[in-house]
Image: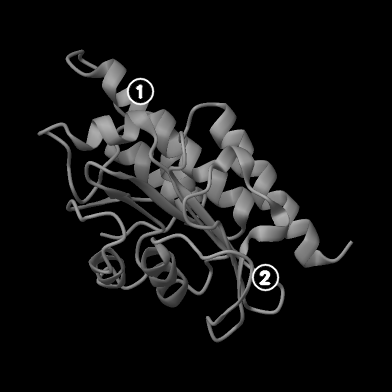
């Protein structure tokens, strides 16, 4: 089995896991990963994470020409913006996960640091998450907004829409976006309570010890 075949299988396996646990439903969400030759494999437009076909993933060459598979997700500008601005990005995942979207609707959310410091894990896996304004799904302006961050963020939250995370590989990206959703769920559960947040000193220790990208 070639590296690309294994990657195709892994993309579909992880996407189905996200779907089966209700992290994105229907035909929502999209996922992409770099291939060994520098191209991309991308989930096709209108497909369900629960039923992706490894052989029908959209295949792009190193020059980003579509060379095989079905037509790609309409969110390609969003994916491309991460690959173009973050050399470490090996995969990008975008979900319509319920709790993160719900948290984006709350008026008290910090747009520059979307997730409150409730646990160490979101800090370790995501760094600071930037909340971007609402854009129409598929709007190329989303890609422009990500490029405007100049590669300083591995994760963004699209207001009223869903999270997008870039990781070193497809497993890392999926793990990180799950952490984003879990932290948003905790934030909603703790809303209205006097929750004990991590202190600034504890956050600094995490950033230093785990070499976390933390855009000031």
How far apart are the alpha carbons under marks 2 and 1? 35 Å
| Residue 57 numbered mark, or none | none
Count of labels in the image: 2
Disc 1 secondary structure class: helix
Residues under numbered marks 2 and 1 in contact, where contact means CB atoms less than 8 Å apart: no
Q: What residue occupies the far bottom of the structure in this picture?
A: 63
| Front in this rendered view, residue 200 or 179 | 179
Q: What residue occupies the far left of the structure in this picture?
A: 107
Q: Is residue 144 above or below residue 153?
A: below
Q: Position of residue 160 (x, y in %)?
A: 22, 41
Observer-side mark, 2 or 1, equals: 2
Q: Position of residue 86 (x, y in %)?
A: 45, 71
Q: Position of residue 185 (x, y in %)?
A: 36, 25
Circle nearer the N terminus (2, 1):
2
Apparent side of residue 12 relative to residue 168 in the rendered image (left or right): right
Apparent side of residue 186 relative to residue 33 in the rendered image (left or right): left
Apparent side of residue 113 relative to residue 58 in the rendered image (left or right): left
**What residue is disc 1 on?**
186
Disc 2 secondary structure class: loop
Q: Is residue 69 above or below residue 191?
A: below
Q: Is residue 169 above or below residue 143?
A: above
Q: Position of residue 39 (x, y in %)?
A: 62, 76
Location of the N terminus (image quadrant): bottom right
| Residue 35 numbered mark, or none | 2
Q: Residues within 10 Å of mark 2 (few under 14, many from 20)?
A: many
| Front in this rendered view, residue 3 or 138 | 138
């Amino acid at each position: 089995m070639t590296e690309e075949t294994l990657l195709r299988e892994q993309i579909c396996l992880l996407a189905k896991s996200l779907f089966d646990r209700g992290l994105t439903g229907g035909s929502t969400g999209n996922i992409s990963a770099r291939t060994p030759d520098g191209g991309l494999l991308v989930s096709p437009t209108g497909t369900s994470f629960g039923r992706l076909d490894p052989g029908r993933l959209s295949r792009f060459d190193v020059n980003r020409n579509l060379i095989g598979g079905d037509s790609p997700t309409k969110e390609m500008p969003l994916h491309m913006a991460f690959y173009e601005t973050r050399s470490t990005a090996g995969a990008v995942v975008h979900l319509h996960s319920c709790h993160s979207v719900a948290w984006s609707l709350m008026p008290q959310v910090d747009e520059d640091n979307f997730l409150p410091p409730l646990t160490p894990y979101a800090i370790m896996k995501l760094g600071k998450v930037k909340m971007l304004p609402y854009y129409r799904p598929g709007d190329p302006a989303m890609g422009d907004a990500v490029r405007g961050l100049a590669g300083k963020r591995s994760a963004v939250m699209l207001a009223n829409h869903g999270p997008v995370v870039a990781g070193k590989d497809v497993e890392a990206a999926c793990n990180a976006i799950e952490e984003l959703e879990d932290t948003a769920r905790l934030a909603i559960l703790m809303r209205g309570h006097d929750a004990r947040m991590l202190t600034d000193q504890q956050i600094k220790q995490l950033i230093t010890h785990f070499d976390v990208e933390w855009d000031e």
